[in-house]
Image (cartoon, rainbow, N blue to C red):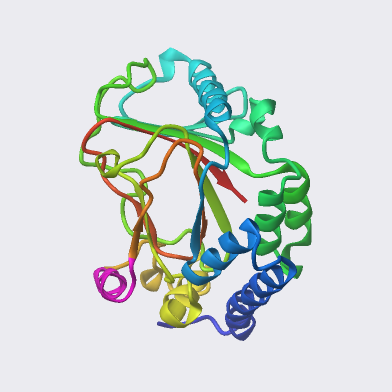
Amino acid sequence: MKIKSIGTKIAILKVILSHIISDIKINLISFLFFSNSNHYRYIKEFKSKGCAVIPNYFNKDEVEKIYQQNIQELEKVPPELIQEKIDNIKLENGVNLEKIRGSIKLKNIENSNKNLKKLFKLKPITLFSSFYSYSIFNVKKLLYSIIHGPLILYNVTHDGSFKHYTVPEGVSDEVIAGDPHIDSPIPGIKAFIALKKVDIANGPFCYFEKSNSFKHLKNFYIRLFFSEQKMIDKENEITRSLDKDLINFCENNFELYKATINPGDLVIFDTCGVHYASKLTKGQRHLMFLYY
C-alpha cells in the first residue's frame, strides 16, 4: 500500500487517538453513574460488547404513535416517484428516499416531522451518544448533535405482506447493508428502535460483539481512513465492507448478536464495530434508526 507522505503520520495518529479518547470517555461516563443504576448496566454492556439493548425504551402506546408517525411520512412520498430501485432521491420536504425490492428507507425524516425530532432532542440518550461520537476534533458537530438531536431514518422490509404503494413487492435476495461492514473507522454511535416485534425470520440486525476494539481491526481502520481521505493510490483503496478474510476472522473470534427484540426496545451500537442486516424470510421488519 503506497501512502502519500503529507499528513500520513497525523492521519494515523488521529485514528489511534479517536479510539483512545473513546475508551477514556466511556470509562468516564461509567464512573459518573452508580453501579446499581439502569444507566450503568447499559453503559457497562456497551463498553464490554460495543452494543447494548435497552428494553422498553418506549412503552406500547408510545411506540404505536411513533409507528403511525413514520407511516405518515411514507404517505408523503409522491406515487409517481416509485419504482423497484431508487438511489437517494431527495424529496421536497427534505427527506431522502432509498429503495430496493421489498424494502424502503426514508432518511432525515426529522426535516419533515418535528414530533419525531422532539423525542430525542436534549434527551439522555442523545447526550451520551453525542459525547461519545464527537470530541475536540468536532466541537461544532458535538454541539449540533446535542442541541438538534440525531438524524432519523425509517426502514420497512417485508415479504409482500405490507400493503403500501411505496413498497408493494416483497423482498428479493438483495439486502440494504447486507454485507458485513463498518460505518466509520472512527468510533461513533448509531441506534435503532423496533416499531414491531423482530424475530429471526424478520431478518434482524446483526453485530459482532467486541469487534469495535481497535486492537482487532486496526489495520483495516487505518487503511479505510486513508481510502476515505484519498491518501492512497486509487487501486489500493478499500470500502467499508469487509473482505472474506476479515469476515472469517470475525466469525471465528467474536460472538454474533442478533437483535431479536420487542416493540419499543432500543439497540445502541458503536459504528466502527462490524455489523449487517440479515435477510428477511418472512413477515415484516419496521425499524427507526438514529444517526448521531
Whether residue 192 is visible to the viewer of this picture, yes or no, is yes
Percent x, y for residue 231?
53, 73
Q: Is residue 75 above or below residue 154?
A: above
Q: Is residue 240 above or below residue 167?
A: below
Q: Is residue 251 left or right of residue 261?
A: left
> How many numbered marks are there?
0
Q: Is residue 84 left or right of residue 14?
A: left
- The residue located at (54%, 30%) in the rendering is 63
Whether residue 229 is visible to the viewer of this picture, yes or no, is no
Displayed quadrant of residue 59: top right
Foreground residue among 142 and 203 = 203
Percent x, y for residue 284?
32, 31
Residue span colored magenta: 244-255
Percent x, y for residue 190?
55, 52
- The residue located at (53%, 18%) in the rendering is 72
Foreground residue among 155 and 53 = 53
Percent x, y for residue 113?
64, 25
Quadrant occupied by the N terminus: bottom left
Report the predominant secondary structure element of the magenta stretch: helix
For the view shown, which residue lies furthest in the front direction? Answer: 36
Displayed quadrant of residue 105: top left
- The residue located at (33%, 16%) in the rendering is 163
Q: Is residue 280 left or right of residue 55?
A: left
In the rendered structure, does residue 176 fall within the stretch colored magenta? no
- The residue located at (44%, 83%) in the rendering is 2
In the rendered structure, does residue 254 fall within the stretch colored magenta? yes
